[in-house]
Image (spheres, helix red, strand yellow):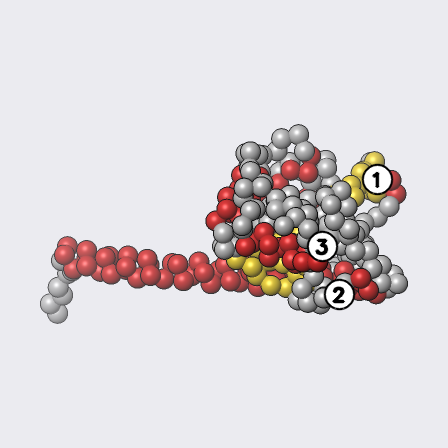
Amino acid sequence: MNRRAFTLIELLVVIAVIAVLMSVLLPSLNRAKEAGKRTICLSNLRSLTHAWLMYADEHDSRIINANARRISRSGSTYSWNNGTPTWVGVWAGPYELEALETVIEMGLFYPYVETVKAYRCPNHSVLSRLIPEGNNPITHYADRRIRSYSIVDALHGASSYGGKPLTNLNQIKRPGTQMVYMDRGAEGQAGWSIFPDSERWFNPPGIQHSNGSVVSFADGRAEYWKWEDPRTVDFTIEWNTGSAANARSYAQGNPDFMKLLRATWGLDQFTGR
């Protein structure tokens, strides 16, 4: 039987065809992979928002505080600082996976969402790996932390930014537009904040989902928001890397800022224009 071997030119043609196919297929595969991670993130925030709603329903409609409280350890015993538990705990010690898991399990929401993985975005390290450790113990080993989500300050959070946080479910006029959680892409001890009376960023939004983030609402929904203005992404990167981000110039005339402002504080509370 006469067998003919491939010539060098034929081999090069085959390799070229494979390279072209890979260049066409890889972006599609990456988009499919990102879509899968986004679906997980949406599911996580729906679960945590349902926990937020159920907790309020079981406590006379009182909204839980948006802040998280640190948990300390003495020997093998963990305890809440100041003795008051919050929706989730914060570990400020050296990296220990067991400690990071324990402070989530001790949180008031864990009985409603009994899986540690639901507190972490699958794309967590995309943004958090950029964060320098600095002097803040919450930013130490940021990419290895296992919580990505924060409740917005407008819901029983800090009031020092000019707003009046809501403390009861009955105060929410439009549950379908009131944002509850922000996937900020990194762990935070305080709630996620945006100035309600000034066109100026406070906390940056997440950008780890193809320059967008996942947010949830008081009616239990979760949505993916892709940012329109490139300044939103620039501000988030600069803020998280410790650069001198210009919070005002990056917010003025920015449709992403206004969209988040409406979702957190509501148009009727914005007096900065």
Pointer 3 with pointer 2, Cβ within 8 A: no
CA–CA distance between discs 3 and 2? 12 Å
Query: Secondary structure under badge 2?
Result: loop
Kindly identify which residue carries mark 3. Answer: 269
Q: Secondary structure at mark 1?
A: helix
Three-letter code for the amino acid on which mark 2 is drawn = Lys
Q: Residues within 10 Å of mark 2 (few under 14, many from 20)?
A: few
> Does residue 240 lie above or below 8 as drawn?
above
Q: Nearer the viewer, residue 96 or 272?
A: 272
The residue at the point 60 percent across, 54 percent down is 258
First-in-chain label (3 vs 2):
2
Q: Confirm whether residue 185 shows in the render.
A: no
Instruction: Check whether the beta carbons of the residues at disc 1 and disc 2 lie within 8 A of each other.
Output: no
Q: Is the residue marked by circle 3 packed among few (<14), some (14-19), or many (20+) residues within 10 Å?
A: some
Q: Disc 1 or 2, which lies upstream in sequence?
A: 1
Residue at 30% across / 62% down in the picture? Answer: 21
The residue under label 1 is 81
The reply, left or right, for residue 127 in relation to residue 221 is: left
Residue 22, percent across and down? 33, 59
Q: What's the amino acid at mark 1?
A: Asn
Q: CA distance from mark 1 to mark 2?
A: 34 Å
Relative depth, front residue between 187 and 193: 193
Q: In which quarter of the view is residue 12 placed? A: bottom left
